[in-house]
Amino acid sequence: MAKWSGWWEQRRFGRQEMCNLLLEVSPEGEMLGSGDDCVGAFTIKGTIAPEVRLVKRYVGQHTLIYVGTNSGEGIFGTWQVPGVPTIAGWTSGRFALFPTTYPSSDRAAIRELMPARSS
């Protein structure tokens, strides 16, 4: 597993850093890992290719869905609480994830898995 950094935003909390973020990216684009933030400890599981779709589960608490794009340098998108109406800033917001370990096979993996740009 490689060290990553990341943040999420919500109206109530502002921008919050994800700490102790350890994520592994397989050659097929599967992502698996864990970390913690001001809400508590969590796990992350999902895919970053061809599109980013991650499930973030807080231990003993709620689940969030992260959907976004792989820029080749990081992952950017929005999170949402599943099963509730979307209220911007309250039940949804923005997020970003970046590999920070150098050299990182994860950095190479997200670049290789970046969707081709349409002409």
Image: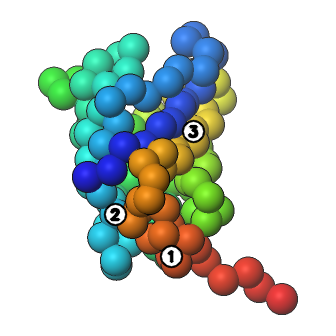
Relative to 9, does residue 14 appear above or below in the rendering? above
Task: Find the distance from the CA under tag 2 to the CA under tag 1.
Answer: 10 Å
Residue 113 visible (yes or no): yes
Q: In this view, does 22 lie to the left or right of 113?
A: left
- Judging by the rendered image, the residue that carries numbered circle 3 is 95
Which amino acid is tagged 2? Val
Q: Is residue 73 left or right of residue 33?
A: right
Marks 1,3: beta carbons within 8 A: no
Task: Find the distance from the CA under tag 1 to the CA under tag 3.
Answer: 19 Å
Marks 2,1: beta carbons within 8 A: yes
- Residue furthest out toward the bottom: 119
Location of the C terminus (image quadrant): bottom right
- Residue furthest out toward the front: 103
Identify the element where label 3 is drawn: strand
Front: mark 1 or 3: 1
Give the camera-side residue of 28 and 91.
28
Residue 82 visible (yes or no): no
Relative to 119, does residue 70 appear above or below in the rendering? above
Task: Find the distance from the CA under tag 3 to the CA under tag 2.
Answer: 18 Å
x, y percentage for residue 94?
A: 62, 37
For disc 3, the neighbor class at 10 Å (few under 14, some 14 to 19, many from 20) is many
Which amino acid is tagged 1? Leu
Identify the element where label 1 is drawn: loop
- What mark, if any, has residue 26 been given in the picture? none
Q: Residue drawn 61% across and 77% down?
A: 115
Q: In this view, does 12 lie to the left or right of 63?
A: right
x, y percentage for residue 85?
A: 52, 34
- What mark, if any, has residue 25 been given in the picture? 2
For disc 2, the neighbor class at 10 Å (few under 14, some 14 to 19, many from 20) is many
- Judging by the rendered image, the residue that carries numbered circle 1 is 113
